[in-house]
Image (cartoon, rainbow, N blue to C red):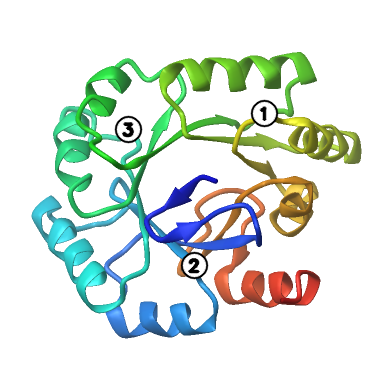
Amino acid sequence: MVSIGYCSLGEYPKVVAIVDRLIPLKELNALKNDGVNLLEIRVDLIDAQFDAILDYCSAIRETIGLPMIGTVRENERTVNNRVMMFKKIVSVVDAIDVELGSPVSDEILSNAGGATIIISEHDYQETPSEDALRDMIDRACKQGADIVKIAVMSNSRDDVHRLLDFTKQCSVPIVAIGMGPIGTVTRVMAPLFGSLFTFGFIGDVVAPGQLPIRKLIEEIKLYYPA
């Protein structure tokens, strides 16, 4: 069974809160008590010095203890420093998220230590065919994935059906997300088909169709009673 830190995945849907700013630790602790299982530290979105982000993650580890995913997407602030950022963030998080086909993936993963590796692919235009989805999985596994994350735009109910059917058939650990208004249902229902965890936002929406974190917790507790 795959895990992120002490959080075992697969038996019950896990809820990930997206940290896109230096949110007060008291608020994160309240979210933990409400039912958040994991935090995604979006280094690329946090408006702070990188050393301050590292100190923040260390404080989360010491005082709250929630397992963390470190994510550093490419933007103007990170484009020249992503490898360095990943090398340092891996010492204070439990997993890292690297894009499928990233040209710096090998260098990043060679320094990942014991962190769980999430290889992610995003398609903001459409939901690809089943063959294309299968190809994403194959390439992600060859890249070194422990978990494959696929986030695709849902433009119709058929798109949602295809994504969920594919998730159910997938033989490797997967996180499947249908983006956009039509795909919002997958944020709650995909775990029923085998998706390991689901993301909610604390402050601002980070991707189309996301639910506020407390609303997401409420829905998960409603549809997946312990």
Tag 2: residue type? Answer: Asn
Dot 2 surroundings within 10 Å: few (below 14), some, or many (20 or more)?
Answer: some
Point out the tag, 2 or 3, that comes first from the N-terminus: 2
Inter-mark Cα distance, 1 to 2: 30 Å
Judged from this view, the residue extending furthest toward the front is 1
Tag 3: residue type? Answer: Glu
- Say the numbered circle drawn on residue 74: 3
Residue behind mark 2:
37
Dot 3 surroundings within 10 Å: few (below 14), some, or many (20 or more)?
Answer: some
Q: Residue at x 19, y 30 (%)?
A: 111
Q: Secondary structure at mark 3?
A: loop
Q: Secondary structure at mark 1?
A: loop
132 in relation to 81, above or below:
above
Residue behind mark 1:
125
132 in relation to 71, above or below:
above
Q: Which callout, 1 or 2, points to the residue nearer the camera?
A: 2
Q: Position of residue 191 (x, y in %)?
A: 71, 53
Point out the tag, 1 or 2, that comes first from the N-terminus: 2
Side of 183 where 65 appears, left or right: left
